[in-house]
Image (cartoon, rainbow, N blue to C red):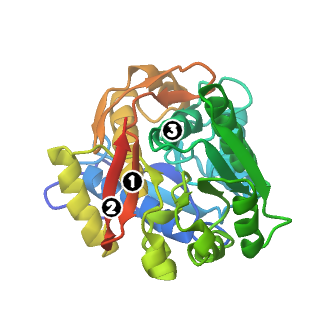
């Protein structure tokens, strides 16, 4: 990508642009819509930074690489971006991909501000090189479990596929619910058709089914099958990983897309900054921005402040994480060390449980927040 043009009135120095590498899923099997929203947020913030004079008179430049949800491709992109001399890495949506990128960044000594991946164990060992904006999976999914218990659900089935991320989610739910009287029943989607899932739900007397599976396959066929089974008219379908957040979900499922609670990382009320960012993102995306777009924006807002105050030296950036205090679109961002989390973590990311309103599937209802 070329350096951006100098905004009207801004005076660039003779120095080169400050480059940051952006890892984003932009092609299948990556979640392309999530990648587009993440990139929109990153690009909006870069534009605003440059409109305000850049990084001490130098333009900020994104060098984007498509991960396509492939951990090996992401690791190779980290190597390439390191060779190009980027000051830091940002982005990624898929947790397993972000884990591969974080491991490589840690090995190379390249700062990585992870935008949207939640897996608790983002690196095997504690690292000073990686920080994260999205909440750890354990925090978000425990909040989701509290929501389920509050709605009277104690027999909870989870449709699962093989993945570190899904296995971690199932374990978090099981460990949190068991001491509170809840039971988690795992349904292995390698062995079950969507119709067979319905029979399992009846046999196990489950009152809730959580989709710990990929989108659109097999999540969409499972929802359609359950919705059409009269025996399951009262069952709650849930998607803690956030599949219903994006417009494609409503397009594929129409009325069946509603009343499926999921996790979203937005505050109940946006600050004036957040409202302004929402308007700009809506214009850029030509649709309502997801929480992932806000995560992208906040990533660059944080990193730009770090670059201004600590320079573009990778070691200086890594040393800055504990001193960050930046007003983001979703609240003030500070990083700390949390028990069991190996990276610098924004500890108080806002967490909501929301769903699409059955009366108006394009509108979201906040069901629970923390």
Mark sitting on residue 364: 2
Q: Secondary structure at mark 1?
A: strand
Q: Secondary structure at mark 3?
A: helix
Residue 317, image x, y percentages: 48, 30
User: Which of 204 and 113 lies nearest the eye of the viewer?
Assistant: 204
Residue 272, image x, y percentages: 14, 46
Residue 106, image x, y percentages: 68, 33
Q: Earlier in the sequence, mark 3 or mark 2?
A: 3
Is residue 311 toward the left or the right of residue 45 in the image?
Answer: right
Q: Closer to us: mark 3 or mark 2?
A: 3
Q: Earlier in the sequence, mark 1 or mark 2?
A: 1
Residue 294, image x, y percentages: 36, 52
Q: CA distance from mark 3 to mark 2?
A: 21 Å
Is residue 3 toward the left or the right of residue 223 in the image?
Answer: left
Q: CA distance from mark 1 to mark 2?
A: 6 Å
Q: How many residues crowd around disc 3 within 10 Å: few (fewer than 14), some, or many (20 or more)?
A: some
In the rendered image of this protein, does residue 144 appear above or below residue 28?
above
The answer to whether one can see residue 16 in this image is no
Question: Looking at the image, how many numbered discs can be counted on the residues?
Answer: 3
Q: Residue at x 48, y 61 (%)?
A: 260
Mark sitting on residue 149: 3
Residue at which label 1 appears: 354
Q: Residue at x 40, y 41 (%)?
A: 351
Circles 1 and 2 in contact, beta carbons < 8 Å: yes
Q: Secondary structure at mark 2?
A: strand
């Amino acid at each position: 990508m070329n350096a951006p043009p100098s905004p009207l009135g801004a005076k660039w120095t003779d120095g080169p642009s400050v480059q940051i590498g952006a890892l984003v899923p932009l092609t299948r099997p990556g979640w392309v819509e999530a990648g587009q929203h993440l990139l929109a947020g990153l690009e909006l913030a870069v534009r605003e930074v440059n409109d305000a004079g850049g990084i001490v008179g130098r333009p900020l430049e994104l060098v984007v690489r498509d991960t396509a949800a492939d951990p090996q491709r992401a690791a190779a992109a980290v190597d390439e971006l390191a060779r190009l001399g980027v000051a830091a890495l940002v982005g990624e949506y898929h947790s397993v991909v972000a884990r591969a990128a974080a491991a490589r960044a840690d090995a190379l000594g390249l700062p990585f501000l992870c935008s949207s991946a939640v897996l608790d164990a983002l690196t095997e060992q504690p690292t000073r090189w990686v920080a994260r904006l999205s909440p750890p999976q354990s925090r978000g999914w425990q909040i989701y479990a509290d929501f389920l218990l509050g709605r009277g659900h104690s027999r909870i089935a989870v449709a699962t596929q093989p993945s570190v991320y899904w296995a971690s989610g199932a374990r978090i739910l099981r460990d949190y619910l068991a001491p509170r009287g809840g039971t988690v029943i795992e349904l292995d989607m390698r062995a079950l058709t969507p119709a067979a899932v319905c029979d399992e739900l009846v046999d196990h007397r489950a009152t809730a089914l959580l989709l710990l599976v990929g989108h659109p396959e097999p999540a969409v066929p499972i929802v359609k099958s359950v919705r059409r089974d009269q025996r399951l008219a009262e069952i709650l379908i849930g998607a803690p990983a956030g599949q219903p957040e994006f417009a494609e979900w409503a397009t594929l499922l129409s009325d069946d897309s509603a009343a499926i609670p999921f996790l979203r990382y937005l505050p109940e009320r946006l600050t004036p900054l957040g409202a302004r960012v929402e308007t700009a993102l809506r214009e850029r995306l030509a649709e309502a921005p997801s929480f992932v777009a806000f995560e992208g924006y906040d990533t660059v807002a944080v990193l730009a402040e770090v670059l201004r105050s600590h320079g573009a030296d990778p070691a200086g950036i890594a040393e800055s994480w504990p001193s960050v205090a930046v007003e983001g679109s979703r609240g003030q961002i500070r990083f700390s060390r949390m028990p069991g989390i190996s990276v610098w973590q924004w500890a108080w990311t806002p967490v909501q449980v929301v769903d699409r309103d059955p009366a108006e599937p394009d509108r979201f209802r906040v069901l629970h927040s923390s």
